[in-house]
Amino acid sequence: MKNALTIIWVLALAATGAWAQTTSATTTPATAVASGIQSQNILDVKPDANAESGYTTQTNGQRALVQPGNNAPMWRQVGSGVTGYSSLPVSQAPEAGVLIQPFVQYPGSRLTNAGDAWRQTRNHWLIPYGGSLVVITLLALVIMFFTKGPLGHDHPASGKKMERFTSFERAAHWANAFAFVALAVSGLTMAFGKFLLLPVIGSTLFGWLTYVLKNVHNLVGPLFAVSLLLVIAIFVKDNIANAADFNWLRKLGGMLGDQQVPSHRFNAAEKGVFWWAVTIPGLVVVASGLVLNQLVPGLGELRTDMQIASMVHSAMAFWITAILIGHIYMGTIGTRGALEGMKTGYVTEAWAKEHHELWYNDVKAGKIPAQRDPSVKPVAPATGSPVQV
Ligand code: HEM
């Protein structure tokens, strides 16, 4: 009996509550509009909140009154690069309060948040066009090799030799060349590995490979920087343009015929490589690399610094890689006898006369010292390489 009474009492209470809710929902809408949530169903709420005047300029607090849970004003502010509160000191983390960077337009990107603009420039321009440049260069060299073949003539190795590079010049050159190859291989893997290697070798191996190569890239960078400065300092004096270079260029370096055009120690093409692939882009790629490694005080703590440095670094790196692939071709299989000079320091007089006749004449006339390497005995033998001590 007592249980039955309790059940009747609970049912009565529930019925009263339900009736009360129905009544308030249907008979007192004005009260609900004034005080918070008007309905569980957004379609029941009239007029629509976005019909209110000033809807688009509402603060997050104002929006919460008419559309609880709609945080669009806050996210719009975050997306516009507003600086929020961060407990980290500004001196150490100047951008810690900025969740999303403001809008910018980087070359080739749409006007969008800087992070996305950087991604668009990298993925839509730098990677595809940089990669194409390198591939086109390789194809052009393959075509050149099979149509034109190596430049110059064979000269008997037993012929009379003359000094072309000192041991210091060669050491600086080879340190730089070694560093360049390591940087190019690791850099290209970081840029294209995701598309070319990952599908073939799988993510575990690819993860390890890129981890190792990224560290190789960071460690070899300083060797490239120092040896680059040495190479520039050593070779700059012989890479200043002169009248003979214009003559060389006018005749396209003798490429259309079988005769080399006379040049000084380096010809116009070598000088072009020196300035436009080694010196200027080399310094830019090193400077931007230092920013990316956060080694330049005051630069590299803002995401914008990093994005700009990254775009400049990749653009220059692709350019240098393409041109230096050409340089490596010409220095190895592309020109008969050229590698000998950089390997041993000596070339045959016949090679010097054929490829750098004006330089050969100057050495023979005593205008340029025949023996510059201080580690070599002053008197050079008539044939073969002088004895190194
Ligand atoms: C495996 C890579 C490389 C090979 C096989 C190579 C080969 C050569 C050869 C054979 C020469 C002598 C050319 C002559 O006697 O006229 C030379 C000169 C030179 N190389 Fe390389 N090289 C390589 C990488 C590099 C790199 C990475 C740089 C700089 C970033 C560089 C900068 C130079 C410069 C500045 C010269 C002197 C020519 C001039 O100043 O115009 N080389 N190289």
Image: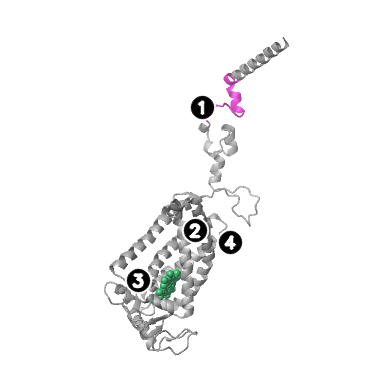
Q: What amino acid is found at the position of numbered circle 2 in the picture?
A: Ser
Closer to viewer: mark 3 or mark 2: 3
**Ligand 1 within 8 angstroms of badge 4 C-beta:** no
Q: Nearer the viewer, residue 379 or 35?
A: 379
Name the residue tied to disc 3: 334
Name the residue tied to disc 2: 310
The quadrant in which residue 356 appears is: bottom left
Q: Does the magenta stretch include residue 239?
A: no
For mark 1, give the secondary structure.
helix
For image coordinates 57% across by 61% down, the residue present is 294
Contact, CB < 8 Å: mark 2 with mark 1?
no
Name the residue tied to disc 1: 43
Q: What amino acid is found at the position of numbered circle 4 in the picture?
A: Gly
Q: Which circle's residue, 3 or 2, is located before the other in the chain?
A: 2
Residue that sits furthest to the right in the current view: 2
User: Does any portion of residue 279 appear in the rendered image?
Assistant: no
Instruction: Pinpoint residue 195: horizontal percent, then vertical percent.
Output: 43, 52
Q: Which circle's residue, 1 or 3, is located before the other in the chain?
A: 1
For mark 3, give the secondary structure.
loop
Whether residue 7 sits left or right of residue 300 in the image: it is right
Pick the quarter of the image with the N terminus. Answer: top right
Q: Which circle's residue, 1 or 4, is located before the other in the chain?
A: 1
Q: How far apart are marks 1 and 3 (CA)?
A: 76 Å
Q: Distance between the residues labelled 1 and 4?
A: 54 Å
Name the residue tied to disc 4: 298
**Ligand 1 within 8 angstroms of badge 3 C-beta:** no
Tell me the magenta residue range.
24-48
Closer to viewer: mark 2 or mark 1: 2
Q: Is residue 143 above or below residue 263?
A: above
